[in-house]
Image (cartoon, rainbow, N blue to C red):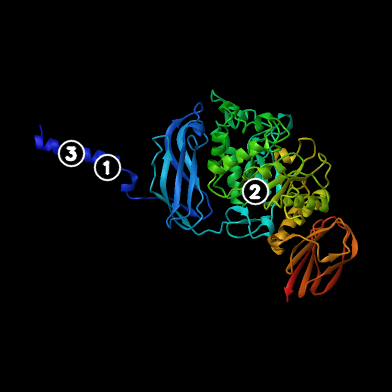
Amino acid sequence: MKPMGSRLRLARLAIILTGLAVLPKSTQAAAEIARGGIHSVVELSFTGPQQGPTDTPARDVQFWVRFRHESGAPEYKVWGFWDSDGKGGMSGRIFKVRFCPTRTGRWNLIEVFSNARELAGQKQDDYVTAVVSVLPGFWMPDPESPGSRWYKRSDGSHPYIVGNTHYSFLSGYRDGGRPSGNDIADDMLANAEYFKKLRMGITGDRYVHPEEKPFLDESGKPTDAGDFSFRPNPKWFAERMDVAVAKGFERDLIVDLILAGPDTKDSRATLRAAKNNGDPAPFLRYMAARYGSYPNVWFCLCNEHDIKEPRYSEKDIARFGSLLRSFLPYPTPVSVHRSPSGWDNQFDDLPPWNDHQIIQKKLKKIAAAADAIQQTWQGASGKGPRNKPTVNDELSYEGAGDKHLEGDTIEAHLGAFLGGGYGTTGEKHGNKLGQYFWGKFDPNVHTAADNLKYLREVIDANITFWKMAPDLSIFSNLDPGFRGMAWPDNEYVLGTNKEQKGIVAKLPAGRWNVKQYDIMAMETKTVGENVSGEFTFDAPASRAVLYHFKKVSK
């Protein structure tokens, strides 16, 4: 037996060692737990309470991390989410936080909060190191553009947006209960070759997977019922939605997530959340936590919120939008899509929540497409303009379903640009049939895709459009179906859709170059170099021609 003094010393040592084991993190050396480029997505894993398919961690486990830059600002509160075993399984203890650093340097985890004792304080005072990158960052309305009508990126760039639609492609199924044969990653990469945005539902909607589902019911069985949105299925989101978002991020393709809809009652019920007493907060918090740190993610609360079951009122939508905003740490674009009409005037009288407005007007002509954008931006009579970007998200679905020809789709998108906004297309060869639902993007079928790519590339390479607003003041003798924009005294654009001879541009002082871009033929032509004064030109017999006037000297 050891002497009493020895036993006391050992006891004291045991107490000291035990105390060290539970010392708060702030007394221990901080560690770098991850590093990544600015505007990348850094994923941190935490070990939390064991959860399974009959548990409700999206609702019951509150978990967030507060990140602060070493300089003292900025600071972001980023929500975490349960990710089962981290491999798409149905049970596990893995919780994750996805963080997007916006400055180089050290980002300290100054607070790790949770109502679960296993997570509370875990990794607190550790840090993430952000290094230089060339990633362009988040999309946000540019307040310096005319009426904030255009988007810019965190790095100050202004890519032009033309979008495509694959409502239910995450399920991999099409009409007749047949597999579509699409691959999510391949679809994302293929779309990125032609478009800047892809709209998609987060569920299978009309074309569900027979076994894999986005939510779990009370018994832990996969279900398509959106009323269980507070019980997201980690397997669905890890293996499908995560793939789409990550591949989009890899290619800088906007992933526009439709949280409710577009079509079926099950898919539209996510915001109703009837099985959670009508509270969609757990679902919205989960979506913000899982995807809100990706700079390429946008959120559309609902597709046609006002005309399909369940319907959501304007007050409902504003409440949902404000709730989603409260969970988002970054300036993520948020809006809603309504019936085939303009933006709802009722939103003008509700607390602000959206950063852009979505309309649905299927159009075929330059003037109609341009005017739809401009009229929406101008706002209701007597209330002044809505100083936000405008997107016509069902501008023209190419195919027999809506009886839109390739030329209709091309001309309409040129019109949306000339109206000071953006447009979205899709391939629809029949009612609820086509790539616009089930994906498997094929530009040989969606034949306008290469022309829309050409249009977008012409704009990006040549036109300072973010300084422009609709304006035809320098042109005379114009056909009433033509539209244009101006950055006064610097650049002008004009769109034509038919032959017209003798168009006159009364150019401001200086020397100007004039380019003609035939979007239908995808051909470029110089029609004037170092011209000045009154410049006369002829529009060809093409449905979509874009003229660009640029001052080259005083």
Mark 3 is surrounded, within 10 Å at the Cα level, by few (under 14), some (14 to 19) or many (20 or more) other residues, namely few
Q: Is residue 507 left or right of residue 329?
A: right
Quarter of the view holding residue 433: top right
Q: Nearer the viewer, residue 13 or 115?
A: 115
What residue occupies the far top of the structure in this picture? 219
User: At x 90% / y 60%, what residue is drawn?
Assistant: 499
Secondary structure state at the residue bearing disc 3: helix
Query: Where residue 269 sits in the image (x, y, percent)?
Result: 64, 31
Label 1 crowd bin: few (<14), some (14–19), many (20+), radius 10 Å: few
Tell me residue 94's x, y (percent). 46, 37
Residue density around tag 2, few if under 14, some if 14–19, many if 20 or more, within 10 Å: some
Q: Nearer the viewer, residue 220 or 376?
A: 376
Q: Quadrant of the C terminus?
A: bottom right
Name the residue carrying label 3: 12
Work out whether residue 422 can be spotted.
no
Comparing labels 3 and 2, the label whose residue is closer to the camera: 3
Residue picked out by circle 1: 20
Q: Quadrant of residue 121?
A: top left
Identify residue type, mark 2: Leu
Measured as percent of width and height from the top left, residue 367 is found at 82, 53
Q: The N terminus lies in which quarter of the figure?
A: top left
Looking at the rendered structure, the secondary structure element under dot 1 is: helix
**Mark 1 to mark 2: distance in Å?**
51 Å
Residue 333 in view here = yes
Label 2 sits on residue = 189
